[in-house]
Amino acid sequence: GFGKLMALINVLYWNFSGIDSASTSAGEVRNPAADYPKALITCVGLITLTYLIPLLSATIVNKPSYDSWQDGDFATIADQQVGRWLAGWVAVAGVIGNA
């Protein structure tokens, strides 16, 4: 319903907030017309990998089943499959990524 639409709008706004501030530092870059597209494409690629690698790894393992995933399950899966050290890194990365 309407609540889900508002949640989607909120997430989209949060994801794109800050994209317009790239122009603020354009004067500090030697060739912004060439460098900005390269940087944006590189960032999109790296961000996609940082989402896909853990998601694919957790989906392949599928314990617990992806149908029952809840908040914090990436850390649980990391703990079960690799160990506490990776679970700790996943938790820290989640905190830093949402700061």
Image: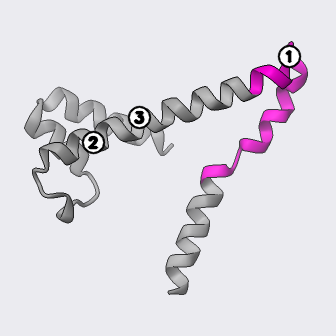
Image height of 65 relative to 43, above or below:
below
Cα gap from disc 1 to disc 3, whole angstroms = 28 Å
The amino acid type, in three-letter code, at marker 1 is Asn
- Relative placement, left or right, of 65 versus 20 is left
- Relative placement, left or right, of 48 versus 25 is left
Q: Which structural element holds mark 1? A: loop
Dot 2, how many residues are within 10 Å of its Cα: few (below 14), some (14-19), or many (20+)?
few
Percent position of residue 6, x then y: 58, 75
Q: Which mark is residue 56?
A: 2
The residue positioned 73% from the left and 29% from the top of the image is: 37
Image height of 89 relative to 70, above or below:
above
- Relative placement, left or right, of 24 versus 84 is right
- Relative placement, left or right, of 18 versus 50 is right
Q: Which structural element holds mark 2? A: helix
Q: Looking at the image, tell me whether mark 1 or mark 3 is earlier in sequence order.
A: 1
Q: Name the residue carrying label 3.
A: 50
Dot 1, how many residues are within 10 Å of its Cα: few (below 14), some (14-19), or many (20+)?
few
Magenta residues span 15-36
Q: Name the residue carrying label 1.
A: 31
Q: Residue furthest bottom?
A: 1
The amino acid type, in three-letter code, at marker 2 is Leu
Percent position of residue 74, x then y: 24, 45
Q: Looking at the image, tell me whether mark 2 or mark 1 is earlier in sequence order.
A: 1
Q: Looking at the image, tell me whether mark 3 or mark 2 is earlier in sequence order.
A: 3
Q: Is residue 53 magenta?
A: no
The residue positioned 47% from the left and 38% from the top of the image is: 48
Q: Nearer the viewer, residue 31 or 6?
A: 31
Image height of 50 relative to 64, above or below:
above
